[in-house]
Image (tube, rainbow, N blue to C red):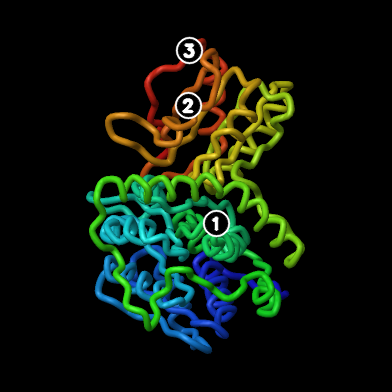
Amino acid sequence: MSMELMSANHAAATATILAGEANRNARGFGGGVYPITPQTECIEKLCGHEFTKGEVVRVESEHSAMAVCMGFVLSGARSFTASASNGLACMAENVFNAALYRLPMVMMAANRTLGPPWNIWVDHGDALLLRDSGWIQFYCEDNQEVLDTTLLAYRLSEDHRILLPVLVNQDAFVLSHTMMQTDIPDQELVDAFLPDLDLPHRISDVPVTIGGLDFPHETEVHRRQHAEAMDRVPEVLAECEDEFEKIFGRRLPGPIVPYRMEDAEMCIISMGTTASTVREVVDREREQGRRVGALRLRMFRPFPLQPMREALAACKKIAVLDRNISLGLGGIAWSEVTATVPGEAVVQDYMIGLGGGDIRPVHIQEIVNDLWARECAESPKIVEVA
């Protein structure tokens, strides 16, 4: 292994290069790519690598990028693409297709605000737009986690019990363009972690139809199979994490990441890089004798319903920090967390950092103070931080 100073964009590309080379004795690697700020540096690095077997195809749109990836996977190649914001919206049709075809692949999203008005800064609404697409979704906190999760995603998605695509998310600019020391594994270790891709429904010399017409009952069966595969993710993920730790010597976080939750009366739930700011405020509250803890929601799909229920069982007040907005409802994470907590708990939604505003400790402290004073939850609140 070696340490290198790199951005999260380059961390995702580096992991993809290692994963692609690990399939060189099978059908190799292939990806379709199209640039969009702030993920362009990722695919630029990817395009600069000459794969032992395979290629990166530069296309004319995000929709085409995902189509190319589907073709590569159906041929048995390991595949990857990256996008953000309106690029994810442009490829949405094929994002659903990739999942419904049960194609194991990985995509990195540098989460960015959807426009117009145009905004290039962080917001989780772009990836959460695709929460019902059938993709597994992870949200990362730092560059090392981006690299490690990308490698893990291939192992998870290609498991025959799963066969689903994985979306690895990183906060735009906060991670995508921030440099930090990142541990890069040797190719031999990645080869040991990622066996050759063996796609059961790979296209071969035998004629086959992909994406034909389904009648109602056939669709019911396919959706049930897809749902069952999602239900198996937590168990298979734990196995993949065990193998990752065995080979690479470090363990990735689970679907939820608790912090000082052992006796917490109040919990602050967040996703992505916001979690590090939340932990600082939790420590300050603990110094004042207040029993505050935090949960980072690392895996959003499948939603970790039972682990969340268990973690929040004793909490009386819960703040959900949403870096997104579902217009007409409120925060997306809040709307799902509310289904996991007991009815007597106060669960308040705070939409914060919309459009990329810096979320600072002072803003989290204001939220904590507001929640301590509450006897009941109110309508979701937008917290302005700009």
169, above or below 369, in the image: below
Residue at the spot of label 3: 376
Q: Quadrant of the C terminus?
A: top left
Q: Is residue 375 left or right of residue 244?
A: left
Q: Nearer the viewer, mark 3 or mark 1?
A: 1
Please name the residue shown 65% across and 77% down the image.
191
Image location of residue 243, percent across then percent down:
71, 61
Residue at the spot of label 2: 339
Asked whether residue 143 is in view, the answer is no
Residue lying furthest top in this view?
Answer: 375
Distance, label 1 to label 2, CA atoms, is 27 Å
Residue 384 disc label: none
Residue at the spot of label 1: 161
Nearer to us in this view, 333 or 355: 333
268, above or below 151, in the image: above
Image location of residue 148, percent across then percent down:
62, 62
Q: Amino acid at mark 3?
A: Cys
